[in-house]
Image: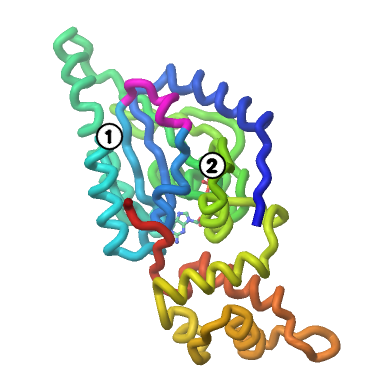
Amino acid sequence: MQFQWYPGHMTKAKRAMQEDIKLIDVIIELVDSRVPYSSKNPDIDQLANGKSRILLMNKYDLADPVRTDQWVQYYEQKGYFVAKVNSKNGKGVKAVHNVIQAACKEKIERDRRRGILNRPIRAMIVGIPNVGKSTFINSFAGKACTKTGNKPGVTKGKQWIRLNKMEELLDTPGILWPKFEDQEVGLRLAYIGSIKDELYNIYELSVLLLQYLRENYPNAVSNFYGIAEEKASEETLKQIAEKRGCLKAGGEFDLDKAAKCLIDDFRAGKLGAISLEMPQ
Ligand code: GDP
């Protein structure tokens, strides 16, 4: 499966982000805990340029807890301040204030030595589409101040949010993936819904996802749909179609519809807490 990319759009977003980064002390980067590598924007590493870095493993409720902890360690070893958050129900969100203070400890002490007291820490949230930036900001800021939605690219515009006396947050649009050379990355982002639906074939996507699940989380699919474990993805899709009544006008199985069903159920976490990547 081939994914396409839009460099023009990307360049503009990158430039805007470069300007925003000049204004802030700490970058809070959100990743999707199911794909902590593929949902991490590699460009940010260059752009961050000396700023403190926080990495939030969002949607940890949807990911395999054992693997998530491995990823936390992995990123901590790389020098990030890391925390697990569930922006949807608020778990771990409050603790991010402490993480900000820890990440900016040196800056606060430097300010203090210079006689600057209580200058707010300025932070910004970054992440690729659909990782939960808007949901996190709403939860973190304590009120519905940004638009949220279940489609990539919903976060638009820019605004400062005063969190408390000590912290200010800049909301920026999510930046998209700059390089699509690695098709595996594209594939995983499609699984979690961070790529527009029009850019891939849902049937092919579901066949590949079933293959991955069979190898890594056997029984996740059969348990959820109440079907027998099959060796071939096509057979499994037929069974899902049968269970879910996905039929075409002539009565034959509608496998595209079954595929969509599977992908939606996976994205919603109904198949269980599943990770798509392991730290190398
Ligand atoms: P953005 O594009 O990065 O701003 O992402 P949104 O904030 O619009 O979130 C995308 C989708 O992910 C929405 O349907 C949210 O409800 C959902 N979401 C966000 N955070 C979490 C989380 O921690 N857990 C779960 N299960 N869903 C989340």
Pick the front one: 244 or 205? 205
Pick the front one: 233 or 37? 233
User: Seen from this angle, which residue lies furthest right?
Assistant: 250
User: Seen from this angle, which residue lies furthest top?
Assistant: 114
| Quadrant location of the N terminus in the rendered image | bottom right
Above or below, 141 against 68 in this view is above
Closer to the N terminus: mark 1 or mark 2? Answer: 1
Q: Which residues are magenta?
A: 43-51
What type of secondary structure mainly makes up the magenta span?
A: helix
Number of the label disc, if any, that sits on residue 100: 1
Give the class, few, some or many, for how many residues have Cα within 10 Å of label 1's Cα (few <14, many ≥20).
many
Q: Is disc 1 placed on a helix, strand or loop?
A: helix
Number of the label disc, if any, that sits on residue 141: none
Residue 75 in picture, x, y percent from top left:
28, 43
Above or below, 189 against 40 in this view is below
Pick the front one: 184 or 32? 184
Left/right of residue 218 with respect to residue 173 in the rendered view: left
For the question of whether residue 225 can be seen, the reply is yes
Residue drawn at (28%, 18%), measured in percent from left and top?
A: 119
